Structure formats: C-alpha cells, structure tokens
Image (cartoon, rainbow, N blue to C red):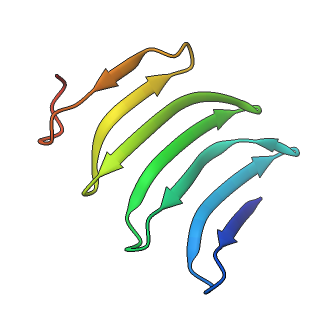
Amino acid sequence: MLCSVKDSTGFVTEIRRYRGGQKHGNWDKFNKKGELVTRNTYKKGKRVWTFHYRDEEVIQSINKKGKIRNFKSCGCGS
C-alpha cells in the first residue's frame, strides 16, 4: 500500500509504503522544492538503509547496523 503525507498546503512531504501492515520498501521525504532529502528503505518492518540527499545526490548512507558512509558532492565515496 502506498501512502502520502501532505502539509497544510497540500504539498506532499513524504511517501510511505506498507506490505502486510508493516513498513516495506522506500519511505521518501521531500523538501519544499520537491527534492528528495531522505530515503529510508524497510524490509518486513525493519529499516535496512537510510540515504540522505543534497541537490539530488546521495551525501550519506547508513546501514541497518548504523554504519555511516559519507559521500563527496560528486557522488563518489569519501
């Protein structure tokens, strides 16, 4: 099931996905410009990845164990 969260003006701030009543797939958060800023990926209700974006590029990833990896603005690993 796909759900969207809107602010008071009707702008979509989040898109969420569920399967069997649990978080599943990508949960996306957007800024006021409509740009993706955070993507959490879930499998059977458990977070497996988090990605943070700036200017539509990944700047940081966090795996399910909490290991953080930062990226340069070109999208290359640091």
**In the rendered image, the vertical position of residue 16 relative to residue 75, given as above or below:** below
Quadrant placement of the C terminus: top left
Placement of the N terminus among the 4 image quadrants: bottom right
Residue 25 rendering spot, x and y as whole percentages: 63, 43
Count of marks, rendered view: 0
Q: Residue furthest bottom?
A: 9
**Is 18 on the left-hand or right-hand side of 32?**
right
* Residue lying at 15% horizontally and 34% vertically, measured from the top left: 72
Residue 71 coordinates in the image, percent (x, y) = 22, 31
Q: Residue furthest right?
A: 21
What residue is shown at x 63% (from left), y 85% (from top)?
10
Instruction: In the displayed orientation, state which residue is furthest to the front.
Output: 8
Describe residue 32's horizontal placement relative to residue 16 as left or right: left
Residue at screen point 58% across, 74% down: 12
> Percent position (x, y) of residue 30?
47, 62
Residue at left offset 70%, top offset 41%:
24
Residue 16 sits above or below residue 8 on the image: above
Q: Position of residue 28 (x, y in %)?
A: 54, 54
Q: Quadrant of residue 58?
A: top left
**Nearest the eye: 1 or 49:** 49
